[in-house]
Image: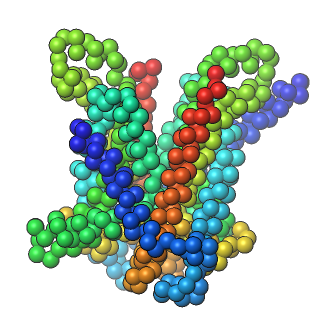
Amino acid sequence: MVFATVIIVGSFFLIVGTIVSKGFPALSWEMLSEIPSGDFYMGGEGGILNSILGSLYIAAGSSLLALIISVPIVIYINMYLKKSSWMGNLTRLGYDVLFGMPSIVYGAFGFTLMIYLGMRASLLGGIVTVTLLIIPIMVRTMDEVIRTVPKELFDASYSLGATRLETSRVVLKQVAPGILTAVLLAFGRGIGDVASVMFTAGFSNDIPKSLEDPASTLPLAVFNQLSSPVEEVQSRAYAAALVLTIIVLLISISARVLSKRLSKNKI
Amino acid sequence: MNIRLIKDKLAGSTMLILTLASVLLAILVGWGLYYKSLPLLEENSVWDLLSSSVWKPSKGEFGFFAFIMGTLWVTGIAIVIALPLCLLCAIFISEYAHPRLRKIVVPVVDLLSGIPPVVFGVWGVLFVVPLIEDYIAPVFVDYPMGYSVLAGGIVLGVMIFPLIISLLLEVFSAVPKEMRDASLSMGATQWQTVKFVLLRKSKPGIIVSVVLAVSRAFGETIAVLMVCGSVIMVPGSVFDPGYPLPALIANNYGEMLSAPEYESALLFAAFLLFVIIFLFNAISRIVLGRIKRKIE
């Protein structure tokens, strides 16, 4: 059993170690601060700033959009519906199922929808598709947090004559750290996913200037560069993977630390 | 009526609409994919599509058998690798480990779950593929190839570690402490308690966890695509390359819009994934919910 645990914990360090040892030598300031030049994919000059920014735009945009959609849903199934309500349970089941959907299904669906609407691959398309992908994560995480709020808090608010809407403000204040965690988790998932943005966000060597521009993303940059025959380009893929790993790890660690620190003052 | 009550009601109905719309989305996704794969389904029977292994898009022949077998091989290998390890690890964490050790192991497993698929893929290319090509495969076959269903299975197995462990820990925590105490106080050893009380009691939960892990493994795209070799064939052994269903979509969709039949075939593949995963998830989540409710 100790052995199994060591393997599982070790696999994490093995992965991070492999990425660091291969990616670090190829990492340079130029990679982080410049956009690719014309022959970048043949070994020319440039960097992956376009992908880094594209990823951040998509992840930030979709996290924000998903937050706006998820909070009312979570409030509704927790505050407006009774605990044993079939609708609440059905919604939860629905989100559990959606949570398990692979991102390629979202990607294929999103792209089909975009063709139907006559949209081109763009930043907006990527944001919308990733939003669909991360809403289930947010709803599930927030739902779990809200359920831990003591019943007395609701009762106290109601007994003062507050409506359900006003009570939800009290509850939201209480679960704010949990919501932050949910947002960060969703952000991390959104920034790392590739199958959903592969078709919907397109690919571009420039930094997207508007929602209609195609945008490159970091995972896609890794994926594309890795399939290149040029060795130098491949090592750039490792460096890009390292950047992605660092961003994601920073986000997940800060999510955990923040949620622990902020929840200290909770009732 | 009081303005506050009106606000409350209004907000309520807005949120109701939002909730309904979001649930409808699941149905919309399924329906959209089905609608798009209709042209293919009208010309071929579902059985032919699933059982034929002839894949010639230019001639309009679409047989998904090779891709389905590729998916099954990769998923099977992943489960065979991940399940025993995760079972032991979860037992260790929940029954044996010192709380302080638990506080180290659980966060690391969480961090593992946050690593993006594409990074797993890079790791697979850099580590797993050479490992198989140079050390494992030469022992068994004459012409070793690193890019194989085994590589896909290993990468996928590591990817589903966190999911299985967190599900198992949830299932184990559902077994009442009194039961363990009863067993221990009768003189059973810790291991006997695990074997006869914990595992027996949580059997349905373990099965459900496996089903959920299988459905996660079915849909994983990029990491598997990067290490599987993408050769259209029915894998005969673990060292053969394969071409799982999601990889098929990822590799070809987007370029094939000029051929409506091809597009329809790829969306049928997505629809297939959707249906399988929908059923697996829905059933196992319902069972898992039952198990949880029993404790409460």
Q: Give the total number of marks visible in the rendering.
A: 0
Q: Which residue is drawn at 48% across and 86% down?
A: A43
Residue B174 in which image quadrant? top left
Q: In which quarter of the image is the N terminus of chain A?
A: top left
Quick one: quadrant of the C terminus of chain A? top right
In this rendering, is residue A208 above or below B109? below
Residue B278 visible (yes or no): no
Q: x%, y% of residue B136?
A: 16, 65
Viewed as shown, does residue B186 lie left or right of A198? left
Task: Find residue A116 and report its image quarter.
Answer: bottom right
| Residue B112 versus residue A146 in the image, above or below | below
- How far from the left and from the top, in percent, is residue B291? 39, 27
Q: Is residue A245 above or below residue A68?
A: below
Give me the residue at 43% from left, 41% from top.
B107
The percent coordinates of residue B125 (x first, y second) are: 33, 69
B278 vs B164, left or right, is right
Q: Residue B255, can we see it? A: yes
Q: Which of B66 and B132 is in front in this view?
A: B132
Nearest the eye: A129 or A193: A193
